[in-house]
Image (cartoon, coloured by chain):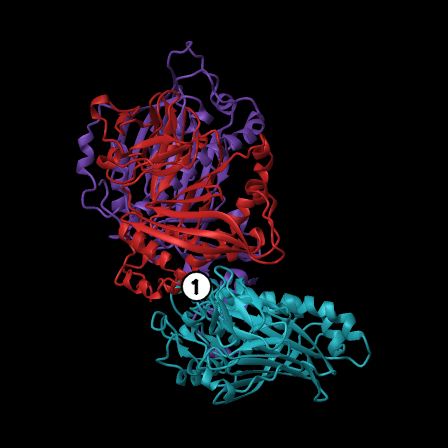
Chain colours: A cyan, B red, C purple
Amino acid sequence: MDQISLTERDAIGIGMHDLRTVDCDPDFWYPVAWSHELKAGKTIGTRYAGQPVALVRPTEGEVFALEDRCAHRQVPLSKGTVKGQAVQCCYHGWAYGRSGRCIDVPYLGKGKLPNGVRTYPCREQGGLIFIFPGDPALADSIPMPTLAHVGDPDFRTRQFGPRVACHYTFMHENLMDMNHQFLHRRQMGQIRARFLSQDRGENFVEARYSFARTDTHQPLAEALIFGRHRDLKGREQPVEEVVTVRTEYPYQTLRIVDKDGDLMMDLWVAYVPQSADQRTTRAFGLLSVRRPKIPFLIDLIWPALAVFTNRIFEEDREVVELEQQAWDAQGGDRNREVFPVVNHLRALLARSGRPGQSAGAGRAVFS
Amino acid sequence: MDQISLTERDAIGIGMHDLRTVDCDPDFWYPVAWSHELKAGKTIGTRYAGQPVALVRPTEGEVFALEDRCAHRQVPLSKGTVKGQAVQCCYHGWAYGRSGRCIDVPYLGKGKLPNGVRTYPCREQGGLIFIFPGDPALADSIPMPTLAHVGDPDFRTRQFGPRVACHYTFMHENLMDMNHQFLHRRQMGQIRARFLSQDRGENFVEARYSFARTDTHQPLAEALIFGRHRDLKGREQPVEEVVTVRTEYPYQTLRIVDKDGDLMMDLWVAYVPQSADQRTTRAFGLLSVRRPKIPFLIDLIWPALAVFTNRIFEEDREVVELEQQAWDAQGGDRNREVFPVVNHLRALLARSGRPGQSAGAGRAVFS
Amino acid sequence: MDQISLTERDAIGIGMHDLRTVDCDPDFWYPVAWSHELKAGKTIGTRYAGQPVALVRPTEGEVFALEDRCAHRQVPLSKGTVKGQAVQCCYHGWAYGRSGRCIDVPYLGKGKLPNGVRTYPCREQGGLIFIFPGDPALADSIPMPTLAHVGDPDFRTRQFGPRVACHYTFMHENLMDMNHQFLHRRQMGQIRARFLSQDRGENFVEARYSFARTDTHQPLAEALIFGRHRDLKGREQPVEEVVTVRTEYPYQTLRIVDKDGDLMMDLWVAYVPQSADQRTTRAFGLLSVRRPKIPFLIDLIWPALAVFTNRIFEEDREVVELEQQAWDAQGGDRNREVFPVVNHLRALLARSGRPGQSAGAGRAVFS
């Protein structure tokens, strides 16, 4: 990593808005709920960047998504009931169909029905319900993401979806900079990430790392999945996996390939802004792990893997929330980034997003 | 209801302030506490629209009401102690009489006593303590409200006084629009309100409804009070009571008259703003129910009636708080009201109230 | 007290900023932690007036104090680990030495190290860790305060350090005005403070009181320390101790001398602003009590003394927080002070402090 010029960063982002005031580009497919959260014949409320969204699953037919406010008195439609292909507001019983049109006001003549509510293009895939919060005309032309190895019998996939009180950009930077393994020293033992190379393009930034273990302690869950590393008595022993972290806007992936070139782990994650200022985020993650040769071993270690990944994620969550708290207290971004990959990532996130309501309120990036 | 022109609403309220920024007219008598909350020889703190009020009940003589801030260091007098016809601040012992005048500073000569604190005209009636928060000179000319059938031996009266996190106007509209029976379908069964007629004047709006039951389920508490309805096997069976809802500014009543023209139930309620922005409310309600012919039956069903009315009120509370939350999130009133009675009510509340501090901050009514 | 002219107050403070918008002068030594809170080889986070401070105690050498934000991503250094004479950030392992200089970024060449973080002059004395939050060049010229009788074998000293949600000036005024004994009537019995005399100078205000008991009840803890007072059946019985309260900016002391002129109790307290608006405070108090002649008696009564002083302090805390709440609600200071000592104290606090960020936002003092 030392070999990468620090002056690269100076070429990036000068004059940009404070990155923490840049909103996500809404013209992508964003997950807003897990499929299992929405039972047949029910509706639930979710949100994208301050916009309340009602998801409706009729007993027959696909899920659909409406603005989660009755046109009458703005009460959430997700508090209502599903009736055929419509949702009926809990308060005075106004009903809205799949198109968002108001199709019934129980105490009003049919000719006099008021207008309806906004709809969102909606798709269900890989156990997730996605909406397209941007321009609906673009929805069909924007591809759905590849969701790790969901459905692949060679892998088992774990869902995780924590809520985190920070801007989504802190999450991208957290994962991209593997030098933060220091944070996880208690869970992972002394691992040192060695930066190998980077790549970038119009809509992505990618970094590759090898991992070197600097102690002899290896967690059980890791050993069971990747095999035990034979350590040379205190010498740094390279773990021969290569870890590739990639932000392909707006999603992020982390893939681990073993010494034989086989994909061992594939993580896909989307960071979905919750509040209007986008400073709270709900992550939707899919972690696909290759099933070991021994049948049922994956089932045996699955709970341990859950505990292990949860602990790691809790550490990440604490630190990115501390970053957001510092931003709030300082009134802007004072980060002094020295790792070129992260600076390229910041530039990607800045140019791919949209100036938020609070843009201009914060300070310059790279102060 | 269909027969009432929707165009009526266009004639109402254009150019008005956002209704949720209209403050209550303080030149009325408002309840601020239940009598039983204030023991003899004690003082309690309450409030009207952000103004803290100390109520004082000497061991002898009437309750009186003072601004709840010591003139010295602004500490609540209601934290102090009652001493004869005065209240003594808890901090340095300054004492104030019924007139608000400072009558003692324990460490200061009598000739040097500072000025006192503001008082409020105060009356106690029907188990409630009222103050007149507006111009004291008007207090005697403004009549006290009629408090349902408190004290009438033919009725038994229940007190209820929840706090609700919304503007008082949402409460008026909630009760006035009986089409919201849909909200209470789990408690009341399938009841359909049929709008009969309306009436309005300078200071009131009134709507009359009949109720039609659309299923065969009738709650026990209702049946015991009003008698069981004989249903014609699935056909809509009119419940022959007439329900009259009336806002006579600033109070609201709901009266139920049975098929013989006898008053069965009489509800009186006042909505008292708590915070300075008037977006939190404490309701003071008196629900008078006619005693059935069979003695003690009313006592037998009283607990069930309490549960029943509490459940209904909880549903109302949730929905009006959702309305306030939507107003907060949307930064103004986007309601699209189609029921003329409610639009007349809104006009009444708007013209009877006073522009609040935040008037102009919200958006136009009926956007 | 009556004999002191009320007109004195008119000469004070006209045209001043609202006292609750005056910040503490940072050019003094302020305690920010108890020594026992910071173990060897550990770091903790504390704060002064919104500035986060990391205190670091290496296993060898003195405590040092840094700005509690890593220069990299602003994460608190106090979440990190101590390594020799340095602290290492928990996130990416950046390390900072005693001087605040960044001495290691594990993944970066030594020649490319970024700048470090701000430091604070730091001293440890009497069980407290002090920093100098102002101009570091002045630190050596500003003396440390005398800390009650810490270390004196004739006294036993109790530490107390509550957090209080009010501006530090309310705390000074609370203690200075002994007429507030009325507040503690339940703990202390009916004690009447008699104002004896005052003194003041450039940087201090002092008031002396004698205490007269107006009932026969004397708390046990008080009696054990000061001896039982022989009461003349209902007549006011002077307690012959003299109590001297002194604010010597920015600290405050309360000393009790008995009838023989011996110092019986010596309280030292510093009020340290926590939030940037200085409307929350952490007090650091040292209460030195002279050991009675009978050995071990002090140990016997120590728990009772703790309970007694805690109860009194809880009453003070409640009332000063009520004062702050009134200030917040009223948008400024409406106090009407009649006690000249307090007005002199206010003038001292106003001229010794610095206009805060919110100066001008509040209303005039002595409205």
Tell me: residue B338, above or below residue B123: below
At label 1, counting other C-alpha atoms closer than 10 Å, the crowd grade (few under 14, some 14-19, many 20 or more) is many
Tell me: residue A80, above or below residue A237: above
Tell me: residue A132, above or below residue A331: below
Q: Nearer the viewer, residue B62 or B209?
A: B209
Q: Can you give x and y, in whole percent of width and height, for residue C326 in the image?
A: 34, 42
Pick the quarter of the image with the C terminus of chain A: bottom left
Residue annotated with mark 1: A74
Q: Could you tell whether B352 is left or right of A211 in the image?
A: left
Q: Nearer the viewer, residue B249 or C143?
A: B249
Q: Can you give x and y, in whole percent of width and height, for residue B41 in the image?
A: 41, 24
* Visible residue check, residue C149: no
* Visible residue check, residue B246: yes
Q: Could you tell whether A224 is left or right of C298 in the image?
A: right
Which image quarter: residue C7? top left
Pick the quarter of the image with the N terminus of chain A: bottom right
